[in-house]
Every structure is written in structure tokens, then in C-alpha cells.
Image: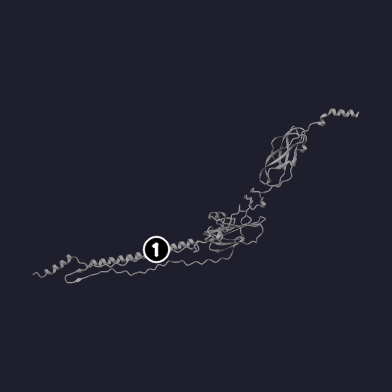
Amino acid sequence: MWKHLLAFVMLAFPLSAGAASVDLAISSGDISFSEELIAGESLRIYAQVSNVGDEDVSGYVSFFQGSVPISDSQVISVRSGGVPEEVYVDFVVPSGSFNIRAEIRGTDPQDENADNNVAITKLFTPIKDDDRDGVANDADNCPSNANESQRDTDGDGNGDACDADDDNDGLSDDVEEELGSDPTKRDTDGDGVADASDAYPTDASKSAVPAPVPAPAPAPAAVPAPIAAVEPEVEEEESTETVTSEAEEPAEVAVEIVQPQPAPEPTPEPSEPTLSPGSSFTFRRVSWNTYEFTTIAPEQSGERVAWDFGDGIVSSQRVVSHTYRRSGDFTVAFERVLPDGTRTEDATTVSVPFLTLQNGIVVAIVSLLGLLLLVGLAMIIRFSWMRRSSASSDAADAASDSDTEDPADQSAIDVDDTGGTDG
């Protein structure tokens, strides 16, 4: 009886035991990324889909970041018993932790087993690398500037890619480029004088501007010898009188021209340290155009100090001496950032005077004015002498004219003398 019943069941339902199944499968281990997870980076998410059923099936995969849809993959056809097919979508890595969910959809024929159609990955924490140089922000000495080498010439914690003064010599890289000096060497020409204090940073034979040579005093103007005016002799009947009128000789004037020499101005003594308005640093004048700045707060590991001297030069030293190359008022800005993000900012104004004999331009102007004064004095003396000489010559000519008589007048006098005897 039971044998007949079993045979009947097997004959009645032959397909239930040997029926073909439709089943695509995906797992979390089948999901991967094309590149390292760096926040903000564009990459691809890949997933492998396997056909574990007995029939060929087509379909696609939908990807989600958590519950937020990313995109749908291309449609694929997976052969029964064949190799897995790979699908992908493009993805931008977020800045926070995330996971990926992949779901098989749109199967044809209809998938008969939904239990293996969804895969969820673990949480991923992306690397924060804003400049995309392969170095994480927390280990990058220039997190906003790509510098894979992490080169830091002066060892101040700021990489050369973002350090305005690579060699920390007080001259910014831009200024050194204009001067032709090496921004990675404190002393480009190797003469023992740092570039910031060297007037000729690329010439080892000299480092300071020579003092200007005073202009030589002009030679005294030559005084011409006076000319004596001689009147002609006039003969008369009874007496002969020679009248000589000589121009008055002007007294010789001895002129000694002395080049005025400006009294040397003493080098100003270093001033006492002055406290900044925010009490963050002190500053004092070392010389005419040089100041020294000192951070007051004790040094902490990992702190960052930045100075901006107001003339295009910056520094990151705690104690720094800066020489200005021109006169004027300059605003010195100070910033200190601690490892915990605490920021201190302060600023003050320093002055570099123009009217000082330590300023080569002022010395040149004073020398030129002195030379012009001497030339003017010489011209005044010469003009005065010429006027006196001209006046003496005119007086001599007038005397000569009054002593010389007209012959017609003399004849008239003779006629009058003889006519008086006619009777």
C-alpha cells in the first residue's frame, strides 16, 4: 500500500524535486573600492554578483550610502554556474564614517531567493587629506598645500610648500626671489652675514653699503687783477700838466671756502623693551631700522608662532630681529596658535625715521645742499667784485673828460687877450 502511494507521489510531482531554481547572490565581501578612502575623493564602488541557481538570470544592483541612494549599476546577465559578474557605480567619499548597502534588483526571470539579494558592509572611516598629497591632515605639515615630500628646510613645522620663509632668515621667499638669493639658505653667499642683514646677499666680497664720500669743495673763484686807467697828457702854452687818473684798486678779498661737514650723529642706543598692546610680546629698537621682537608666553610643544612685519616679510621664530629696508610706519602683527586650537593675536606699530644721518639718502641730500650753498656764495662774491670794478672804471672816465679842454675854447681865450691893446 505504502509503496504504491510513494510511487504515485513521485509520478504526480516530478518537477518539485528536480525543478530549476532562479537565484542571484551578493555578499558584503563582494563589495570593494577602486582607491583608498580619502574624504572628498571620487572613486568607484565594485560588487560581484554570483548565479547560484540553475537558470541564466539578468538584473542590476542598486547601491546606497546607508539609506541614501547612490546609483544603479549597469544591467548584467549572469550565467548559471558561470563566473561572477562585476558591477560598479561612481561615488564621492564623504568626510564622516559610512557603510555601503548593495541590493540585487530587476531580475529576469524573477529571483526566487531574496535572502541573499542584499549585502551591507562594515563602517568605513575615510582619511582626511584636503590637499590630496597622500598624507593625512593630522600628519601633514602643509594640510592645504600638496607636498608629498613633506620637506621642511628650517624645521619649524611648516613645510616649504606653505612656509613663506623656508630658511627662516627673516626674508620671505618672494623677497629672496627678487634679490636673487637662495630661499633655502640663511647665508646665500657664505660670507658669514645672514641674507637679512647682508646688503649684497649674493656677493661674498661685500656685505654693507659703503658710507657716501663727501663731494670735494669747489676751488675759489679767480679774482682778475685790477686795470689802471691812464689819462693822456695835455700841453698848455705856459705850463704843461700831466693828469693821471688811476682807477682805485679794489682791496683783495681772501676767500676761504670750507666744506660744511655735518656733525656725526651718534648711533642710537638700544631702547628698553616695550610691551605690546595685548601683552603678547615685547619689542625694542636695536638700531635706526632694526627691531627685536620677543614672545612673552612660555614655549609649548606643537605651538605655531607667526610674525608679519608689515613690509612683506614674515617669520615663525619666537625671538626674531628684523631690519627694515625703508623708512615709515609699519604695523607688526603677531599670531600664536596652541595645539588645542587656542589662538592669540596682537599687533603694534613701529617707526623707522627718515631724517637721520644714518639714512644714506639724507646724507646725500645734505651733501648736495652744502655744495649748492658753496657755489652760490662764490657767485655772490664774484658779482660783488665785478660791480666795484665797473664803478671805479666809470669814475676814472668822468675825471678824464673834465680835465681835457676843447681847442676852440682855448683860441677864444687867446683872442680876448690880444684885443685889449687895440686903441
Q: Residue furthest left?
A: 423
Residue 22 or 231: which is nearer the viewer? Answer: 22
Classify 10 Å Cα crowding around label 1: few (below 14), some (14-19), many (20 and above): some
Q: Position of residue 69 (x, y in %)?
A: 70, 40
Residue 107 seen anywhere in this rendered image of the structure: no
**Residue at 14%, 68% in the rendered image:** 414
Measured as percent of width and height from the top left, residue 145 is found at 62, 50
Instruction: Say which element carries label 1.
Output: helix
Q: Nearer the viewer, residue 59 or 382?
A: 59
Give residue 187's position: percent from left, percent from top.
57, 59
Camera-nearest residue between 115 and 332: 115
Left or right: 179 with respect to 157? left
Identify the image quadrant of residue 52.
top right
Quarter of image, res 174: bottom right
Vertical placement of residue 244 versus 39, above or below: below
Q: Is residue 39 left or right of residue 396?
A: right
Q: Which residue is mark 1?
A: 375
Horizontal side of 256 relative to 241 (left or right) equals: right
Q: Is residue 399 above or below residue 186?
A: below
The quadrant of the rendering that contains the C terminus is bottom left
Is residue 240 visible in this depiction of the protein? yes
- Quarter location, residue 5: top right
In the picture, the quarter occupied by the N terminus is top right
Q: Position of residue 54 (x, y in %)?
A: 77, 33
Q: Colour scheme of this structure image?
A: one colour
In the image, farthest residue toward the right: 1
Instruction: Name which residue type carries label 1.
Output: Val
